[in-house]
Amino acid sequence: MQKSVLVAADRIRRLEVQGARNVAITAIKAIEEGAKGSEAKGKEAFLNELSDAREVLFASRETEPLMRNAIRHVIYAVESSEKGAVKELIDVVSEVSSQFLENLERSKEKIAAIGSKRITHGSKVLTHCHSSTVTGMLRRAKEEGKSFEVVCTESRPVFQGRITAKEMLEAGIKTTLIVDSAVRYFMNEVDLVVVGADAITSEGNVINKIGTSMVALAAKEARTPFYVVSELLKFDPVTIHGDYEIIEERSPSEVWDDPPSGLIIRNPAFDVTRREFIHGIICEEGIISPHAIGELVSRKYPWILK
Ligand code: RUB
């Protein structure tokens, strides 16, 4: 197994790399680097190496369809390439990886341009966890000269909300940090909720950091618009065929590193927010209804469904 892949998988597992986009970027770069160091003698051996890398990276975090879509896309390009020499196939990996990363960056910029229009002067925006897509959009709104405030949750147990808070302060945005359980307390004060996504299912449900569905419930009760900000490539094709998105369960030690013996601690990393709680998904194609996701993905990225 190539070292780059093992190192990347370990960094992803330990949350040294965090958030669906960063996870996918790290994985695809590791595959590309690993491929460059390949000593395979033919196409079949090269594909076997890629397949081993895929297994290791897929297992690093379970709820990451963007990473899986990225890796599948690269492997599919090699499988369907007419080229046979390993040297040429390495070039295919590099080319497809670069295109994928460029597309991801373009999508992020489009999302920022579209979503920032929903951030108005003097408004207060609540977000949960840390999503680089959400913070990119908020930074863009600030660059456009809008003055608004951000409220972010701590996002226990590993406090990704602190990353969001720091980024927002660095961008010059007035920011308040609250404990997760204070979301309802502040909900009437905010104008809008924006969260990221790790996965979007064929039914238009969204999987994001644990607690997101409670934030959505509170938003619905307070009649505060709740938006998901996400690249379409977070769509998980296995959900079309009836499979549920697997929810990663992480170590209890993240919750309490020295618990009394006999105590059961559960630590799911994500939860499912049903589509009826979502006002819209802000994606690279515009602000869409969760109902439209399957059709849009099949039009824009038909290869996902292969
Ligand atoms: C991060 C998280 C983020 C999404 C979207 O969870 O739930 O909201 O991954 O992030 P974790 P992005 O910290 O467990 O990875 O928009 O950057 O893809």
Image: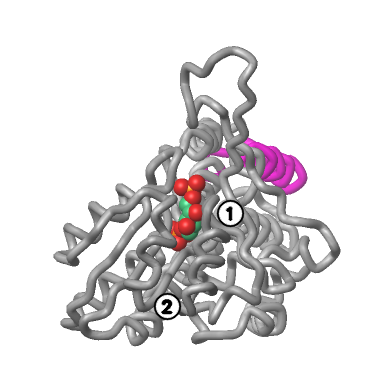
Q: For ligand 1, tell me if the residue under mark 2 lies within 8 Å.
A: no
Of tags 1 and 2, the one toward the viewer is 2
Picture residue at 71% right of the left edge, 49% below the top: 246
Q: Which mark is on residue 275?
A: none
Residue occupying the far right of the picture: 242
- From the viewer's side, name the closer residue of 257 and 239: 257
Residue 41 within the segment the image draws in magenta: yes
Residue 42 within the segment the image draws in magenta: yes
> Height in image: 39 above or below 242?
above
Would residue 41 be seen by someone viewing this image from the given angle?
Answer: no
Tell me the SS state at disc 2.
helix
Magenta-colored span: 35-57
Tell me the SS state at disc 1.
helix
Q: Which residue is mark 1?
A: 67
Q: Amino acid type of disc 1?
A: Met
Residue 89 in percent (x, y) is at: 62, 54
Q: Is residue 251 left or right of residue 239?
A: left
Q: Which residue is mark 2?
A: 111
